[in-house]
Amino acid sequence: MRILVIEDDQKVANFVQAGLEQEGYAVDVLHDGGSAGEQARAVDYDAVVLDLMLPGRSGFQVLRDIRARKPSLPVLILTAKDGVDDRVAGLDSGADDYMVKPFALAELSARLRAVLRRGTPRENVLRVADLELDTLTRAVRRAGRRIDLKPKEYALLEYLMRNSGRPITKSLIIEHVWDIHFDSVSNVVEVHINSLRNKVDRGFNAQLIHTVRGVGYLLTDAPP
Amino acid sequence: MRLTLRSRLTLIYTAVFGVLLVATSVAFYRVLAYQLDADITANLSELTTGLHGYLRFADPIPTVVFDPTDPEEAAFVEEATRYYQVFDTGSGQLLVQSDGMRPLGLQFSPPEVSQFRDQQHNFDVNTDFGRLRLSNSVATPGNGHSYLLQVGVSLLPMDRALERFLFLLFTGVPAGLIVTFVIGRWMARFALTPLSRVAESARTINIEDLSRRIPVRGARDELDNVATAFNDTLERLEHAIGEMRQFSTALAHELRTPLAALRGDIEMAMLQPTDEGLRQRFASQLEEIDRLKRLIDQILVVAQAEAGQIPLAMGAVDLGTLAATVVDQIEPVAQSRGIAMRCDHASDAVVQGDAEWLKRLVLNLLDNAIKFTPQGGEVVVDVSRMGAVARLAVRDTGIGIDPDVQPRIFERFFRADPARSRGVEGVGLGLSLAKWIVDRHHGRIEVHSQPGQGSTFTISLPIAPRSAH
């Protein structure tokens, strides 16, 4: 998988590149948007990570350039602005997703996975070790034993299992599981993770739900 | 009591006019009374002098002698002799009394007669037939006798005229005042209506749309002055807000980009296999950066909100269902802290609003309630409708708010007693944001709180017009 990163801030560009390479992506970096369109056409990228505030040209113009040449190339926008208008404008102009700085690498890779996965059929039955979740019947079993979950707990578990093996940030969880924008308010996620742990992990030797300090949560049977 | 400018103008106008009216009336009355009185006195003295010329004292009893064929003379004598009487000054005896005088019962004793003789001036007496003015004059015809002649003029016509005039004043002045009040009110309205129109068009200009201006009529009068001054202020405001918007955008960018780089550096450092202690320190730095990010987010939201940069997507919102949804989502948090949470809601509290922001409002209040309520406490949400108002109350059994600081809790960055909110994350923006949301929905937010007992936040929002049947 090859990713084009267009970001003028050297440090941010570096860490995005390093982080994505760590995840196994091939990464090219452009520091301004001038040649982005050309580059996107010349090289067969799988996705673009685009900063909205670039010297000389606005990210929106770059986005239009890319879209003109590669209409279906997934574009993930990075922005330091967090205005409602900016979000709408970003998504309206054809971006697939956006992310506000500063962001966790885990969030970037999760969003990237999501846009890359778009269009591919989803698994109906998710499995991690002896934990099994059927998205059709909404049945959850661990070691064959049925686990009863409340709707939010179920949604949280499904999201964690779909991203199993990779840390997921709290803001991603809130975005996917809740329809309320909690920002800093309350430890809703912690509370649900705790109750989920009580139901899924309690009584088992292998703990599946892990806290990654400074990042978020991780569901895996092979903790780092 | 606060009076409107219109009422005040009307009252001042009426009062000034009233004082003038009363002063003029009193002056007129005085002048009229004086003039009538002076006329009567002059007439009396004329009658007295004239009557002296017609009196003959040949007999011991004086008689009036005149030429009845002369109509002028006859008329004069008739008037002069209507009320007259003659006394002998020596004996004080009444010698002659006219028919008009007789029923009045004006008998004077000899000492009185001699007193009249000595003083010889007019005096008024009250009789059953109204007041009478009498003149005293002495005639000494040279027959060894001296006579006191009293001639009278009735004051009744004058008194009646003055009475009528007074009656006119007492009815006319209040009537005049009423008319003045009505005219004054109309004039005040006439003068103030254009001003209200200016105010009305000023009110339609909100912070999101500062490019609008109040129409100037071009009459170059005081009202155009007001409109122009207002437009100048708008101009400056528009400019300032524009700068503020640019500033908050620039601030966001300048703060977030280095934070992103910093966060990235730390994350990259964490990827290197290092000892656990170092990893913990990196993780703690990431947490701090996330805290900073949330703080920047909140400050920006409040800054943008106050700069009017956040448009609301208005629609019909069932406040009860909305509150129940939020309670449902945050209830596990309350439960995890040993706090019971409940939501009682009516189904007819439909308001016009932005559902996302209203959710955030309820969430902020619930979050606050949970933060400041100890284990074993209770948080109750109650949504009801009272006429044209939807009410949402969040009641907790928490630590409460000191009465001294209650008026300040909606201020930005205000946090009550840091000792009591220790360990509670937040920077004191939640309630100021809550207030902003309520204000944008044309509602009110109030707090009732007793330290140690708990707090109740009550929000009142107008019922959506369509459902207000």
Image (spheres, coloured by chain):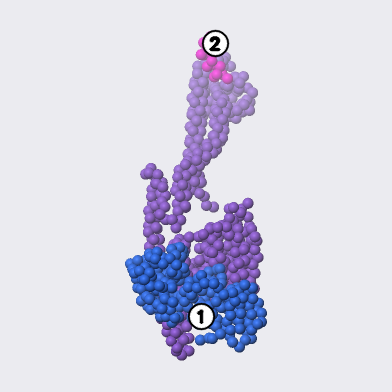
Chain colours: A blue, B purple
Q: Residues within 10 Å of mark 2 (few under 14, many from 20)?
A: few
Residue found at the very far top of the displayed protein: B69
**Mark 2 residue type:** Pro
Give above or below for B200 relative to A24.
Answer: above
Range covered by the magenta-colored residues: B67-82
Is there any visible trace of residue A221 in the rendered image? yes
Give above or below for B158 relative to A6.
Answer: above
- Marks 1 and 2 share the same chain: no
Q: Secondary structure at mark 1?
A: loop
**Residue at position x 56%, y 85% from top?**
A221
Q: Quadrant of residue A8?
A: bottom left
**Residue at position x 54%, y 72% from top?**
A121
Locate residue B313, reporting x and y percent.
51, 59
Locate residue B85, reporting x and y percent.
58, 21
Locate residue B374, reporting x and y percent.
61, 76
Residue B68: numbered disc: 2
**Mark 1 residue type:** Arg
Spatial separation of the CA atoms under disc 1 and disc 2: 143 Å
Q: Main secondary structure of the magenta part?
A: helix
**Residue at position x 46%, y 56% from top?**
B206
Read off the residue under disc 1: A166
Identify which residue, B422 or B335, lies in the foreground: B335
Identify which residue, B138 or B355, lies in the foreground: B355
Residue B130: numbered disc: none
Query: Which of label 1 and label 2 is nearer to you?
Result: 1
Is there any visible trace of residue B177 in the rendered image? no
The chain identifier of the residue carrying mark 1 reads A
Give above or below for B241 relative to A119.
Answer: above
Q: Quadrant of residue B101?
A: top right
Does B78 lie within the magenta span?
yes
Identify which residue, B149 or B134, lies in the foreground: B134
